[in-house]
Image (cartoon, rainbow, N blue to C red):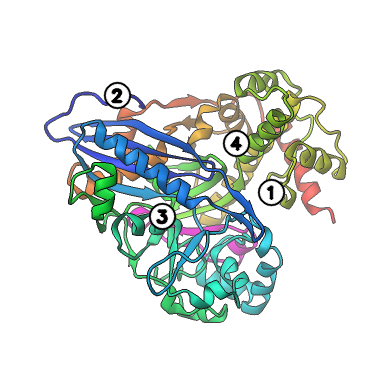
Amino acid sequence: MIGEPPGASPAAGVFAAADLGATSGRVVVGRVGGGELALTEVNRFANVPVRLPSGLHWDLPGLFTGVLDGLREAARSGAAVASVGVDTWAVDYGLLDADGALLGIPYHYRDRRTAQVAPRVRDEVGAQELYAANGLQHLPFNTVFQLAAARGTVQLAAARTLLLIPDLVTHWLTGSVGAEVTNASTTGLLDARTGEWSRDLADRIGLDPALLPPLRQPGDSAGELLPHIVAATGLAAGTRVTTVGSHDTASAVAAVPATAPGSAYISCGTWSLAGLELDAPVLSAASRAANFTNERGIDGTFRYLRNIMGMWLLEECRRVWAARGEPSELASLLADAGRAEPFGAVIDPDAPEFLAPADMPAAIADYCVRTGQRPPESRGALVRCVLESLALAHRRVLRKAAELADREITHIHLVGGGSRNELLCRLTADASGLPVIAGPTEATALGNILVQARTHGLVGDLARMRQLVADTQELRRYEPRGDLRAWDAADARISGALAAP
């Protein structure tokens, strides 16, 4: 639940989560203990990228200011914050010089500089060898490709340390240097089997392995807040920063309320991350061909999943409509989508033209024309097209994950911002033929808070963390309706488009 936490129980502790997503950031205060798990959002701020002559960048100083403002509000609330945890999106990084100063403004993963580099690296290293080493889905913005694109630059030559975004924020808070393992596993430079940095892969792309910092595990201490951070926020001297699952998806999956076998998950926000939690990576040729990723999770688990272009599609449509002065209010759009004709048009959400178009509605219309479909003729029809296409992608990815990992899926947990979208949840249940349990919406912040609470002895293992989420958070269940034949036909249309030259 979000709101004022109930009165403190004797065994409760208070923790602050700095949760930076791809479109917004926030600081959340959580109280945990004695069967209690309650969150209060104390600051929310936009995450708007900056287009500079050098390309697309993150406004990281602005985001850090938002974090400090949130920690100040946490201190003003009067709660005795025991520790702070930081999570963000994956793959992006900052470079520090010999004095620890940031070299330039970190690039945004949607910057196009890696588009031609990624295929070249795959050819140089070998696609099979690359997957056998890091087990990652081929995405053109993976850190390994970003670093290959930086070869020969003055910044990389001057760099002495590479820090992923959550580790960079932690460094600014504490002065400490490290790389949290769940996020490090998204870089393409972590050995999927050993969980250690791969010096061989670093050498193959021309990266000095000395740039890669020591690895940290979720639950490790990252040090105390620096004196000037204490002065700026009003938090107590000696307040610690606890390493959490710093990849936001790792924190979200830690808070999936999976209390029964047979569960799959979809962490749905800007991206949809759909997959299974496993005890070991799946590094088969079939897994590589299906483009699945193996990322580290809490307590030595693996997040076996695929990235799907998620609510980004809808939010970019809304952004374009708002800029034109056209109606873009979400509730009204979803109501119109609910009344629109089913399966008027379907798209592949992961088509490259949807990664960073200037005009998403136009990109969707062009895709429909290219694949022999009539483009949606209204905003409601276009929203229905997006949501049905996402539901089909969820179904397609989870079915393939179950096949490759030899697992049976009996139900789906859909967490994150997308869990508020009732139409998407219903369509995902209908498309998959499986029940969908929606919530919690704030899974990432909950996972962040729970790892901190565990280091203070206030919650037990991963199973107990999840049971606490199930017991305290609002969940909604959607049963599948109808038969699957219409969904099968729509899926065949997408598959045909994917197979077309």
Q: Are marks 3 and 2 in contact (CB under 8 Å)?
A: no
**Label 3 to label 2: alpha-carbon separation:** 27 Å
**Label 2 to label 4: alpha-carbon separation:** 37 Å
Residue 11 to residue 405: above or below: above
Asked whether 327 or 336 is in front, the reply is 327
On residue 4, the disc is: 2
User: Disc 2 marks which amino acid?
Assistant: Glu
Frontmost of labels 3 and 4 is: 3
Q: Which corner quadrant of the image does residue 301 belong to? A: bottom left
Q: Which residue range is magenta in the image? A: 279-302
Residue identified by numbered label 3? 166
Indicate the secondary structure of the residue bearing disc 2.
Answer: loop
Pick the quarter of the image with the C terminus.
bottom right
Q: Which corner quadrant of the image does residue 404 belong to? A: bottom right
* Mark 3 crowd level (few <14, some 14–19, many ≥20, 10 Å Cα): many
* Label whose residue precedes the other's in the sequence (3 or 4): 3
Residue identified by numbered label 1? 356
User: Disc 3 marks which amino acid?
Assistant: Pro
Indicate the secondary structure of the residue bearing disc 1.
Answer: loop
Pick the quarter of the image with the N terminus.
top left
